[in-house]
Each structure stands twice: as structure tokens, then as C-alpha cells.
């Protein structure tokens, strides 16, 4: 599965563009997950790197729930039982506060 598309690129705000913004007003642009784990990555911002892949910022829900940076390259390399990362193709419009409160 392609983790980034031209459509997503056009919607993705630059890293730091949501600084000092209320989480109720910060949109989640992309949701990634792995079918064999309980981990979920919610992307709110991203910048294209020199190698053509993206560095993202958003919420990561795994053993802990925290805001942080993660890369498209890291997500693309993650394999469990030979299966890679998935992008939620049916993810609707949600705000960061919803993910923080575990409502999505």
C-alpha cells in the first residue's frame, strides 16, 4: 500500500504549523495502523525530506499515547509476520482531541 499520495500531500500542513493551536481545532490528516498490532499513528503535520519521504508529527497510540515525530520511512519498514503498515482509507474527518481522548 502507498503510504502517501499526491492528494494527501496537498492536505498536509507543514510541521510546526499547528503549534499553539487547540487540539480541538487540529485536524488529523492521515491514520496509519498495523493489522497485527494495537498501534495507531495519527498524522497532523508533515514535511518532505531530501530523500523524498516524509517526516510526520502527530499522535502515536501504542503502549503509551504521546505526541511525537515519526517518518514515512520508519512506517514503511515496519513488518510483522511479513505484513506492512496500512493507511486507513475510510478514515473520516477527526480532530486531534478525539484521538487524545480515545474516541476514535
Image: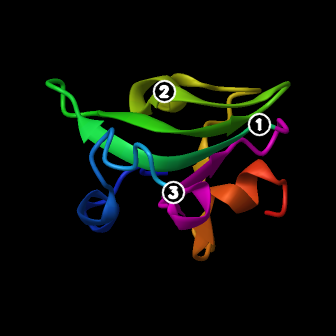
Q: How far across and how far down the image is residue 93, in percent?
A: 57, 75
List the residue tagged with mark 1: 39
In magenta segment, residue 66: no
List the residue tagged with mark 2: 69
Q: Which residues are magenta?
A: 22-38
Residue found at x 31% / y 48%: 17
Alpha-carbon span between mark 2 and mark 1: 15 Å
Q: Give the image quarter of residue 102.
A: bottom right
Q: How far across and how far down the image is residue 89, in percent?
A: 57, 68
Q: Secondary structure at mark 1?
A: loop
Residue found at x 75% / y 49%: 100
Alpha-carbon span between mark 3 and mark 2: 14 Å
Alpha-carbon span between mark 1 and mark 3: 14 Å
Answer whether labels 3 and 2 touch (C-beta < 8 Å). no
Q: How far across and how far down the image is residue 14, in percent?
A: 27, 46
Q: Secondary structure at mark 3?
A: strand
Camera-side residue: 86 or 56?
A: 56
Graded by Cα atoms within 10 Å as few (under 14), some (14 to 19) or many (20 or more), the crowding at tag 2 reads: some
> Relative to residue 8, is residue 3 drawn left or right?
right
Q: Secondary structure at mark 2?
A: strand
In magenta segment, residue 26: yes
Residue 30 is labelled as 3
> Relative to residue 80, is residue 53 drawn left or right?
left
Residue found at x 49% / y 51%: 1
Amino acid at each position: 500500500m502507498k503510504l502517501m499520495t499526491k492528494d494527501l500531500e496537498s492536505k498536509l500542513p507543514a510541521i510546526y504549523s499547528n503549534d499553539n493551536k487547540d487540539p480541538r481545532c487540529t485536524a488529523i490528516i492521515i491514520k496509519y495502523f498495523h493489522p497485527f498490532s494495537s498501534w495507531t499513528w495519527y498524522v497532523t503535520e508533515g514535511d518532505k525530506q531530501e530523500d523524498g519521504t516524509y517526516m510526520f508529527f502527530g499522535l502515536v497510540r501504542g503502549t503509551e499515547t504521546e505526541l511525537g515525530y515519526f517518518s514515512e520511512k520508519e512506517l514503511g519498514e515496519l513488518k510483522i509476520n511479513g505484513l506492512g503498515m496500512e493507511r486507513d482509507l475510510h478514515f473520516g474527518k477527526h480532530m486531534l482531541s478525539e484521538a487524545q481522548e480515545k474516541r476514535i
